[in-house]
Amino acid sequence: MSTKFIHDNFLLENKFAEELYHNYAKKQPIIDYHNHLPPQQIADNKIFSNITNVWINGDHYKWRAMRTLGINEEFITGGASDKDKFLNWAKTVPYTMRNPLFHWTHLELARYFDINELLNENSAERIYEETKEKLNTEAYSCQNLLHKVNAELVCTTEDPIDNLEHHKRIAKSDLTVKVNTAFRPDKAILIEDEGYNAYIDLLGNAADISINSYQDLCDALKKRISFFDENGCKLCDHGLNEIYFEKFTENEVNSIFEKKRNNQLVTNEEALKFQSAILLFLAETYHEFGWVQQFHLGALRNNNARMLRVLGPDTGWDSIGDYSQAAKLSAFLNALDSKNKLTKTILYNLNPADNEVMATMIGNFNDGSVKGKVQYGSGWWFLDQKDGMTKQLNALSNMGLISCFIGMLTDSRSFLSFPRHEYFRRILCNLLGDEIKKGELPNDMEWIGKMVADISYNNAKEYFKF
């Protein structure tokens, strides 16, 4: 019996799970169709000076754990040395047991660095120096980190104003991993946000359109969608509290946008009308271009106002929101479907109470035109751990067809996060293997193995058609 914590049959509890994973899941390439990796680092083929730069900086999952343990911000996002930040993370790791960070940490050390020692205060110095020595070689450059995990495609996320210069450089390089982008227009939608007008000016500059009216805004966004499409973009993404769907008239929307451009106060009711209009416009445009649209719904962001002022957004102060999702999401999808303008769609929920809502909602709009046209996306953010993934898989299995599922993504800013695909695949195989053992599924390895391979890779390959 192996003494390694991360061993060949990690999370696999019987021979059926082992066979499914090793024969059908393990060797499948990775299609990571949503992440926040910086494309410049891929284009530059960046070599990281140490593990803190690639593993801790920017990782708000780790930051939240360190803060909970009582570690001073100086050693998290502050001015402490990279080594001291790593040592404080190592001190935290033993206290993360039963949090997915404990599994991810040791999977990532094993898969990228062949380190099977548990990370803690005693091993921290050795592991820091060993990883530093390896990272300072060409074998651990950004591009080679992608090769190490058998990545076939990674899809980063860019704002409409991005000039995609780094994606253009990557496309001209000899990198065999395909790198694509997803269009994320949230800043053009959220009219109540501070800085909205300044952003619209930037959007106008990018589109070479003076944005003075709502129609100008639509024209600018469509021009940027066309630009992204010309550069290989095939999908978009939105991070919203909820889907907006309020009744509005064209005159109302024009007036609301004009008020905002004149720096007048826009009420919450007016904002919802405007956001409903622009979201419908965008969704119809995505259909025109044949894109896949993604909606990440349910985060309650920037809860700690004091720390938002100090550190800014995306620094670890977000949580699960309890928004009402079903009625407006249904009305939004129905409005598009009624015009035959509903493109392929992936829905992700952050509140686990919405699992069955999402799993049943997709069935309302899977019309037989495309296999799995509307997808219930994988466990996201606070739910991309064993319990969250299992509940998502069970909800989808009970109320839809798990066999049509397009599988896992990292949604990460780290080049060391790709073992989350392995984590997902092991959980999937163990779930199915357990039911074979119980006699709840037939012992038909060829068929169930094919389903595992499809969920791990083939379904996404077919769905996105990159």
Image (tube, grey):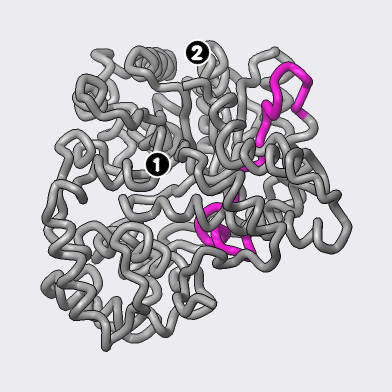
Disc 1 + disc 2, Cβ < 8 Å: no
Q: Residues within 10 Å of mark 2 (few under 14, many from 20)?
A: some
State which region is magenta: 365-388
| Dominant secondary structure of the residues highlighted in magenta in the image | loop
Position above or below: 23 against 68:
above
Residue at the image point whose x is 53% and y is 25% from the top: 464
- Residue at numbered disc 2: 289
Whether residue 135 is visible, yes or no, is yes
Residue 385 located within the stretch drawn in magenta: yes
State the separation of the CA atoms marked 1 and 2. Answer: 30 Å
Position above or below: 196 against 14:
above
Mark 1 or mark 2: name the one nearer the start of the chain. Answer: 1
The local secondary structure at tag 2 comes to: helix
Residue at the image point whose x is 23% and y is 45% from the top: 142
Specify whether 136 is left or right of 156: left
Specify whether 371 is left or right of 360: left
Image position, residue 375 (x, y; %): 66, 35
Q: Residue 50's image quarter? A: bottom left
Image position, residue 433 (x, y; %): 73, 57
Which amino acid, by three-letter code, is at mark 2?
Phe
In front: 148, or 83? Answer: 148
Q: Residue 133's image quarter? A: bottom left
- Residue at numbered disc 1: 150
Residue 257 located within the stretch drawn in magenta: no
